Image: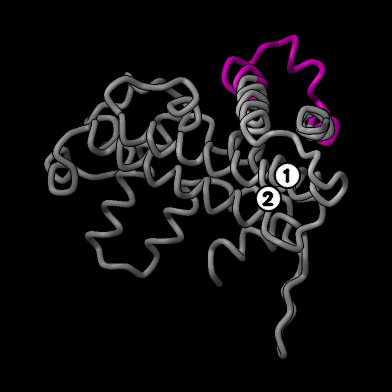
Amino acid sequence: MHFMKLTSVLFLGIKMSTASLVEPEPTATQASALFSFPHYLALQCEGRPKGERTRAQLQIAACKILQDDSPQGLTISAICEQAGVSNGTFYLYFPDRNALLDTVLGDFVTFLQSSMRAAGEPGTPDPPRAATRAYFELFEQNSGLMRCLVQPLEGYPDAQSAFQRLNREWVEVVVASVASRQRKEDGNQATPRAELLRRAYALGGMVDQYLANLLLSKDPNLIEISQDREVVLETLSLIWERGMSR
């Protein structure tokens, strides 16, 4: 099944049917796993030639190290030990550590983009809340990679450009949705596009900061009031709703 459609089905808990098949609702563990980039990489390389599997193993190893350590701990020796290959094997696939990390971050942004599109695709009940839930899951399951994106690393311009494009695409989706609704409700009295763009960027930054403090910095005060996932999602969704309204 196509990755984007599968992500949407599992995330929204919708039973997908064909003429002869009805897929059961996924468990919470299965749904969470689909938001894990290392898990996705592992699925993608199943049955592929050995070289492709080894390349994926190196990327997965980098993801796992970043989940528990800072980018400074991402050494070639640590990557190879985690992947179960020799240091010499590394250089068959990447010229240096920076090239590996840039590739991982670039591919991860594409994964984020696909997941967000799937969560908010046409026909989804309450797309903003669905997309917010997906982003929360993606941030939590891949917190090490998200740290590299929301707390920019010097020397990785391609990854940062990709993340900025992701933000821009999401902002455009939000603004288009709000503008369409306002035109239907108020005719020509819609909020200027530039104002909607500013609001969307500001609100996106607020959500990133909230999740960074909760999942990366692990602020104990924020953790204390964020135990209930659904309540947190309600708060973040409300921020988008109120912030983009007139």
Image spot of residue 65 (x, y percent): 40, 31
**Image height check: is 39 above or below 199?**
below
Amino acid under disc 2: Thr
At 75% from the left and 57% from the top, the residue drawn is 12
SS for tag 1?
A: helix
Magenta-colored stretch includes residue 162:
no
At 36% from the left and 70% from the top, the residue drawn is 47
**Image quadrant in which you'd find residue 44:** bottom left
Image spot of residue 19 (x, y percent): 72, 90
Q: Is residue 131 left or right of residue 161?
A: right
SS for tag 2?
A: helix
Magenta-colored stretch includes residue 230:
yes
Whichever of callouts 2 and 1 sits on the residue coming sooner in the sequence is 2
Q: Residues within 10 Å of mark 2 (few under 14, many from 20)?
A: few
**Image height check: is 66 above or below 173?**
above
What range of the chain is rendered magenta? 210-232
| Main SS category, magenta section | helix
Which residue is identified by label 1?
179
